[in-house]
Image (cartoon, grey):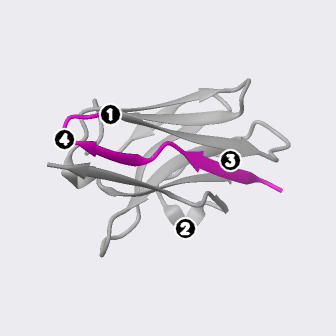
Amino acid sequence: EVQLVESGGGSVQTGGSLRLSCAASGFTSDDYAIAWFRQAPGKEREAVSCISATDWMTNYADSVKGRFTISSDSAKNTVYLQMNSLKPEDTAVYYCAARLGLYSGSHSLYDYWGQGTQVTVSS
């Protein structure tokens, strides 16, 4: 069974940095993708970034390009989201999600989810 465990959320001021971690287990092949989504109160869940375990290709939402970096440590089966130059509008619960096959920006296509971690950016 695939399991995802997130860590690394917290509270920072505008311009600060945080690194989220997603420890994955249970995959039986390398044909999967992991994505970070976020959901702010009263808003739709949106894709932030995703990475393919097959070829390590990455993708980012326009709102985080140049500020966030997704990476993977295959030895630790962990995906990271380094978030720099944080803004108040980045405040949300961040979720790690996984799906078999190619990455997608649609949360409905992901089968496995972590528990979520709160990120709060104050002005």
Extent of the magenta region: 1-16
What residue do we see at 58% from left, 48% from top? Answer: 6
Residue 88: horizontal and vertical position, in percent?
20, 51
Q: Determine crowd level at label 1: few under 14, some 14-19, many 20+ residues with C-alpha closer than 10 A.
A: some
Amino acid identity at mark 2: Ser
Marks 4/1: CA–CA distance: 9 Å
Sort mark 2 into few (<14), some (14-19) or many (20+) by Cα contacts within 10 Å: few
Task: Give the structural element (helix, strand or loop) at label 2.
Answer: helix
Which amino acid, by three-letter code, is at mark 4?
Thr
Query: Marks 2 and 1: CB-CB under 8 Å?
Result: no
Q: Which of pointers 4 and 3 lies earlier in the amino acid sequence?
A: 4
In the displayed structure image, the side of residue 8 where residue 112 appears, left or right: right
* 102 in relation to 112, above or below: above
Q: Which of the two discs, 2 and 3, labels the residue nearer the N terminus?
A: 3
Q: Is residue 2 magenta?
A: yes
Residue 17 tag number:
1
Residue at mark 4: 14
What residue did someone put label 3 on?
Answer: 101
Residue in view at x 80 percent, y 45 percent: 27
Residue 35 painted magenta: no
